[in-house]
Amino acid sequence: MLYYLTRPLARLTLGTFFRKIYLSHRERIPRDQPVILAANHPTAFMEPCILACWLKDPLHFVVRGDIFAKPFYARILRSLHMIAFYRMKDGGFSKIKNNYESFSAAESVLRARQPILILAEGRTIHEKRLRPLRKGAARLALGTADQHADLDVVIVPVGVNYTYADRFRSEVMIEFGEPLRVRDYLDSFREQNNQGILQLTEALRAELEKRVVIIERAEDEALTERLFQLYRHDHPEKGWPVVEENDRRVQAERELASWVNALPEPEKDRLRRLVADYWTALHSARLSDLGLQQPERFNLLATFLLLAGFPLAILGYFLNLLPARLAKYIGDTRVRYLEFRASVVAAVGMLAYLLYYSLAMLVGGIIWGWIAVPLVLTWPPLGYLFLLWRERYVGWKEALKVRLADRQETGQLREMREAIAALVWPGRSADPQQR
């Protein structure tokens, strides 16, 4: 019951937290068939929430057993469709024994033809790389298929990619891969369990690598992220609808990262110097790549709309300020690990706004009567209007700064940018968006 009550609230929260959510190839998830979704794990619990909100069927989750330590929390977590699997460090052999019940619970879900999500990497680390996969997904899939010959179990790889996983109003790109038929690995599993598990895990890894943006070396991250920014400013996506079936962005960023990975070191060093010089020049001129590449953001219509929308936007800002500040404060001061920041901020924000609006309706109802309820219901859309207004304003301001800047200086900056583009995208065929 709690799962179904929480889901619409989480959907509103995540649709606000992210500027854009790209979901591509959901049609690859078989319907009315036992499905294990195996995803990479870049954040604490953001990707399970996103998938639960935008997949049609109720989703169940495999999670760490240590968070089930207290009976009260365990009941809540089970009502949210979570299944506990224990590791040795979660309590030794006494807890490991509980995994028999967990496997039974997971098999029951699969027999009911409802999907289960497993975060295949096991640990969450904030990086754009695929880490070694745990064997849990393959073990559950093969164990279930072995015990239930009537179940055609499949594993669907899920690549989860964020522009900036820890930032509010960033973007997330999720791509579903081709299903892996577990029956194809059963003979090997029956001959030698571990061999079948390893083969299926390796096949899963190969499929996930096709769906994940991978920057192989940590020292290349700064360069690649700068190139991502150039690409995004060259190919802006519309902010509406928030959720979109579109794999252009993830394909382009995946190919760009692969290109950087394969670039010979001398050429990479040259590119790194060009990019660093360009950004240094931008900062010296107090300009941005966004404004330089999208000067059309400053125009009469945009100016009029910003002026006309300002009163409602600023009203939305102040009406929603308290819970927003609380969520940000918790994220900034109470979260030790970067991987948990976005998840905690979103969860705290959802609860804070729910309590805030409820109290506003209650107090307003006591003072002004029932009219307070529809008035308070206007606060969320006004808050969202402020977010849209602020993003438009930032683009307008950056474009205005370029318009007011010295033409010779902006011309030199554009030449520096074109020199970078000539190396990265020497022709239209090298630009994934223009193929």
Image: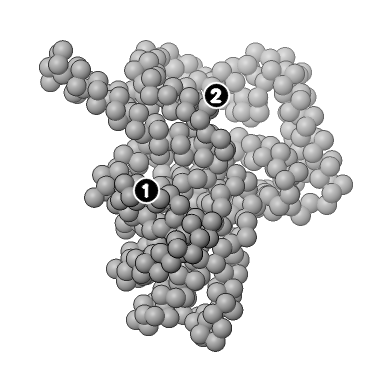
> The residue under label 2 is which amino acid type?
Gly
**Where is residue 219 shown, x and y percent of the image?**
76, 43
Residue 215 in the figure: left or right of residue 59: right
Is 185 above or below relative to 319? below
User: Label 1 to label 2, Cα distance in Å?
Assistant: 49 Å
Look at the numbered disc 2 and give the secondary structure of its residue.
helix
**Where is residue 360 shown, x and y percent of the image?**
25, 20
Look at the numbered disc 1 and give the secondary structure of its residue.
loop
> Which residue occupies the extreme left position in the image?
369
To which residue does mark 2 refer?
395
Q: Quadrant of residue 286?
A: top right
Q: Which mark is residue 48?
A: none
Residue 253 in view in this figure: no
Count of labels in the image: 2
Q: How is the protein colored in the picture?
A: one colour
To which residue does mark 1 refer?
70
Residue 201 in the figure: left or right of residue 420: left
Q: Residue at x 36, y 77 (%)?
A: 151
Asked if marks 1 and 2 touch (Cβ < 8 Å), the reply is: no
Asked whether 216 or 346 is in front, the reply is 346
Q: Earlier in the sequence, mark 1 or mark 2?
A: 1
